Image: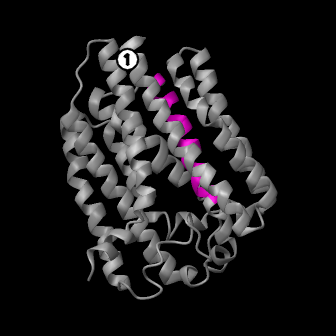
Amino acid sequence: MKLKTWFLETRPQFLLLSVVLAFLGTSIAWKEARTYDGEFYLGYALLAFIGLLLCHISVNVLNDYFDYKSGIDMEVKRTPFSGGSGILPPARLKPTQVFWFGLISFLLAIPIGVYFVITRGWLLLPLLLVGAICILLYTPFLTRLGWTEWAPGVGMGALPVLGFYFVQTATYTLPAIIASIPSGILVHNLLLLNEFPDTEADKKGGRKTLPIVMGKARASVTYSVLTVVAYLWIVGAVVLGLMPVFSLIALLTLPFAIKAIRGTLKHREEINELVPAMSNNVLAVLLTQLLLGVGYILAGFIG
């Protein structure tokens, strides 16, 4: 069995999200430590990143497994941003292999979580439990509830940012919570837009995503409004003094977001024409969070 096949099963292009989430959460904590002469632990940041990466791999791989078992993978029209890894339909790996790969990845992350709960505090436990629910129940259960996108937004958006902040500070603060909200919205929208090409296949597989429940027209408006809200949130938080002024550097990604919104509203029914909008959305999601992290670092040095 080629190692490359296992690597592709993780959907490595999507794992960049874990990198920017780790960077943002760690940058927020580093800025606070520098401002208030607190302690910063690089080892904690690296260990937490390994844990997040394992969790991200787990949810990607388990999603692939359950989509194959439900028949969704046989119906989807794959794009660079949707439709799964494409590993299972041609039998490049066996379903049981993929299932155990996803489950073992999750199990390997547990000791890291336990370590941080013991060393940094029990207040981390509720965050980890919610994250675990989002990983294990996302595809087989949460995707059938009628609003599935909240789970990635919370579990792979806001909570990782807060988690990386907590492992450094052993506490939660209002500014840190405020700073995590744009990540939650952006990751929610990342999944929302990527669901558009899979609508028919998802419907046959029993999923109830927003494009199915609301229809693509209303879902595209919802996507557009939430994208605008993410940027307005950053501006509002800066005005209120809850995020550093350097956070406004994240507004440099607005051109990508605008292109994504226009493309979604215009081409929501046309898969091939929607791909550029999906590409711009990915750039907006990743670069906005990356630049927010850069903003916090600049604030630590200059502010």
Q: Position of residue 105 (x, y in %)?
A: 28, 64
Name the kind of residue labelled 1 in the image.
Answer: Gly
- Dot 1: element: helix
Q: Which residues are magenta?
A: 175-193
Residue 107: say if magenta: no
Question: Viewer-proximal residue, 38 or 114?
Answer: 38
Question: Viewer-proximal residue, 143 or 250?
Answer: 250
Which image quadrant: the C terminus?
A: top left
- From where the camera sits, is residue 242 visible? no
Q: Position of residue 226 (x, y in %)?
A: 68, 42
Residue 183: say if magenta: yes
Q: Main secondary structure of the magenta part?
A: helix
- From where the camera sits, is residue 234 visible? yes
Determine which residue is flagged by label 1: 300
Q: Is residue 209 above or below residue 178?
A: below
Q: Position of residue 187 (x, y in %)?
A: 54, 48
Question: Viewer-proximal residue, 41 or 294?
Answer: 294
Q: Position of residue 111 (x, y in %)?
A: 20, 53
Residue shown at 39% from the left, 61% from the top: 12
Q: How many marks?
A: 1
